[in-house]
Image: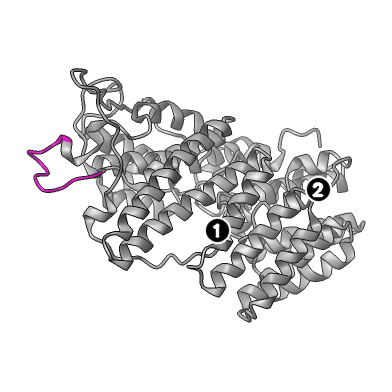
Amino acid sequence: MTEKYFSSSAEPSIFDKIVSNPSGQDEDTEFLNTRVSNDPITVADEIRDVWEPVEQEPGVPPLLTMPGVLSVEDLNDPVKETVATAFGADEAKKMPLLTCNDVTQDERGLRKLIDEGCFRAAVNLTSRLLTIYGQGYGRLGQPAKHTPHSLQLWFTRFALLAKLGLHDLCQMESDAFGELSRPDIFFEFYPEMYTNRRGSMASFSFRLLLAELPMYLGAPNVAMHRLTAMANICKRIEKLMSHTKVENNVKFWRRRRVRVQHSIINCALLLKNYNVANHFIESLIEETCWTNEELGALYSAAGKIYLQCGDILAAEKKLTSMKKLGLTSPAFQVQEFIDRGLIFVAHNDFEEALKNFQKAATLEPTNVMIANNVAVCLLYLGRMKNAIETYENMMEKNTKQAINEHFLINLCTLYELESNFSRPKKLVQLQRIAGQHRDLCMNVDICLKLHSSN
């Protein structure tokens, strides 16, 4: 659910809002969560690093990658600034977030900041570490030598900027990398340093991040083009791996290809191109490599896609297919209740939807997404007080997960619907946020609606 849902009762349905985070994880989790195994697959570096370089035109100097940090100022903590405005500077000083000065100036310090949830400080530290590589502030467009470590630093920086919602800065800095296809991104460009190593120095995750980035900048068609190109390369490499007769090599590249196809589905949904989304999810289902658990998750994801395009009957068929697998784990019991609840929402039967979401909540009482669905149904049934209590109880049970953009906007919108004097309750939530001592990947003023008239 989003604020848009609350502001307009004329929308034909709300299930597309409710299913926006089916896994109950952080809000930046992708729509399609198929529970494909994340167990590591052991392969040699030469298999992991394979990528297709762009052929260079003979006699033409190669275009090189010359990045640089564009922001000279460290990122500030917007939560601390909001607390200072609302409660005074003394209260803000009680928020002891780590800064980049509090950790070792290396990868270990960077990891500590990320583990502690101090993402802005981590971005600030990447600026310092990239300066050591001659790629800091003011170095954009200047010759640079790349290593796997320097590229991993850039990937970490861009991933953090994307997580913080700083997509414009992320795009401006990442433009220097293009699509990571220039020759100086490959080991072969540095024969004196990497005599016997070939392939891409940039990680697969780095490539995927840059391909997905346009989705967050209002250019999903650009993202779709990049992702499709990535998927085609992965298919060719997967086919090549089949000739090695090593099963792990094929599995490794199949998993990468499937991961890109997941992103294509997400992008197609953003474009509301349901034909493309349906094509890819059905093609994944038809593959014979899945365990029953993975196939069940694919059926569940397909059902949600069909709900988004209004095909309730097809969604019900996917739920039936999932049930026929005979999966009995608690996780799939929860998923079945959620999926059934969403189908009832599509039928505008909020009473039955509520019953199913409540059954899911009984099995996973700290699942924020399920609590949100319960609260939405309560609101539609005219039980606003109970809806607010549901949100507030989850803030107590699972504060870390509940402090996310959609959850807080929904709660604060209900505060405004409940009373013309909602600010004190919003400030209570601000204090709760401040007490987490973690960076937030959202605009606190907007989420808490602190500039609202009530």
- Asked whether, in this view, residue 336 is left or right of residue 190, the answer is right
Q: Secondary structure at mark 2?
A: helix
Q: Nearer the viewer, residue 189 or 173?
A: 189
Q: How many marks?
A: 2
Foreground tag (2 vs 1): 1
Residue ID for mark 1: 284
Farthest residue, direction right: 382
- The relative height of residue 365 versus residue 282 in the rendered view (above or below) is below
Q: CA distance from mark 2 to mark 1?
A: 43 Å
Q: Is residue 395 visible?
A: no
- The relative height of residue 419 versus residue 333 in the rendered view (above or below) is above
Mark 2 surroundings: few (<14), some (14-19) or many (≥20) residues within 10 A: many
Q: Nearer the viewer, residue 334 or 178?
A: 178
Q: Quadrant of residue 363?
A: bottom right
Q: Secondary structure at mark 1?
A: helix
Of the numbered discs 2 and 1, the one sitting upstream in the chain is: 1
Residue 454 colored magenta? Answer: no
- Asked whether, in this view, residue 431 is left or right of residue 126, the answer is right
Give residue 185's mark: none
Give residue 415's mark: 2
- Residue 241: x and y in percent read 31, 57
Mark 1 surroundings: few (<14), some (14-19) or many (≥20) residues within 10 A: some
Q: Which residue lies at the image location 83% right of the left edge and 48% below the top edge?
A: 13
